[in-house]
Amino acid sequence: MIDFTLTDEQLAMREMAHDFAEKEIRPVAWDYDRDGTWPQEIIEKAWELGLMNSHIPAEYGGPELGTLDGAIIEEELSWGCSGITTSLSANGLACTPVILGANDELKKEYLGRLSEAPLMAAFCLTEPDAGSDVSGMKTTATRKGDKWVISGSKCFITNGEYANWYTVFAKTDKEAGHRGISCFIVPRDAGVIVDKHEDKMGQRASNTATITFPDVEVPLNHLVGEENHGFKLSMMTLDHTRPGVAAMATGVSRAAMEMAIDYSKERVQFGVPIAMHQAIQFMLADMATKVHLSRLSYYNAATLLDQGRRNTIESSHAKRFAADSAMEVTTDAVQVFGGYGFIKEYKVEKLMRDAKILQLYEGTAQIQRLVIARETLLPRKADAPVTV
Ligand code: CAA
């Protein structure tokens, strides 16, 4: 059965998230963007309301919502500000490998920390020389007695400066390519160094840092999943989280479309509101189609996971379509505003800057196409595992 009707619980959750975005995020979003401020106050309020960590299972103190539930929340919050939403939702990226692969003791300790207090965690995969090419990473983890010693540096780490703990991917067998990567939890107080805070074009309320692990030691049981199985764990994680990025992109597109609609009804040129001109109507129509299809694509990708099915291609379809659409919709929204769209006072330009990163993080638009091409040319088994 195909049914796009949300349950009463999902509708109530969507309303709560929208209300939060409208009252707590929107009014301050442009100030946070201008100053690049860390949204601590908003994080604390969102955490209190249960709008963070939706993915954490109940036995570790979380609300154990489904992937679709979490994505619906992300669309609404991103309608308010996608930068602040990146800060609020990045725990999901850091926790997914833990939920998929960690032992019970690790889950209790580290997922429990996020359930007990408004703390942050960060997902550390990317390195200066290993972005799209994950298996080119140079960070190493070496077994020494009863410890793992982790050495290396990770860049573009969301929430890196504020994280209480890190999910870190490192080479445990340098000769084995993608089959020599493992995943670890590294608590911040193990000696992690925050090297660089990035000054970004958009999503300026999110924190992006370089994180260095200078021979940091963690106990042997801080290995997440099996040794040398970290690459697949990272790919499975991205299958889980890309629908959320698509949902965020949908929220950004929707916000831009609404601004363009409101402005087109007010702005008079050639004696009529510009909404009366077909040239503008067609731009608004294309925006509406893109918002609609972006939402359907993330609903589909998220629902498959909630049904326990693999969603690799659908996840990439959703991420690439919704992110590309967000870039197009926000650019067209600026166009509807004409010269005013280029002026910060009119606010729509922030959405265009924010949209850009959606085509870059959690796999570029090109990587999504690469995944789609591979899955189309050489489909993997539909019953391939979705957990490790
Ligand atoms: N699920 C399970 N297994 C998978 C998988 C998936 N989705 N995708 C690939 N695999 C398996 C393959 O079956 C293969 O298995 P075998 O070893 O058994 O053969 C293995 O993994 C290697 O797969 P590939 O040959 O496809 O690997 P590749 O090196 O060619 O890489 C890639 C594939 C798609 C390019 C991948 O590297 C990729 O997704 N790159 C982008 C990384 C990315 O998204 N980075 C963003 C980091 S997160 C972020 O943005 C930070 C932030 O804070 C926001």
Image (tube, grey):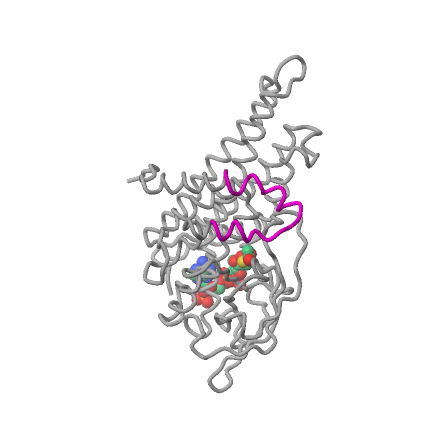
Instruction: Specify the quadrant that holds the C terminus.
Output: bottom left
Q: Residue 10, how many percent across, how many down?
A: 35, 42
Q: Is residue 383 left or right of residue 348?
A: left
What residue is rendered at 46% in x and 84% in y?
Answer: 146
What residue is rendered at 50% in x and 55% in y?
Answer: 90
Q: Main secondary structure of the magenta part?
A: helix
Q: Is residue 60 left or right of residue 20?
A: left
Residue 232 is one of the magenta-drawn residues = no
Q: Residue furthest top?
A: 271
In the foreground, 331 or 104: 104
Q: Does the rendering let one see residue 322?
A: no
Q: Residue 382, how many percent across, how many down?
A: 36, 55
Q: Residue 169, how many percent across, how many down?
A: 52, 68
Q: Residue 59, how many percent across, how many down?
A: 32, 62
In the foreground, 136 or 114: 114
**Residue 236 lies in what quarter of the image?**
bottom left
Q: Which residue lies furthest to the left in this view?
A: 1
Looking at the rendering, the stretch of residues picked out in magenta corresponds to: 23-45
Instruction: Specify the quadrant that holds the N terminus.
Output: top left
Q: Residue furthest bottom?
A: 145
Q: On screen, 299 above or below 379?
A: above
Q: Does the rendering let one see residue 237?
A: yes
In the foreground, 258 or 30: 30
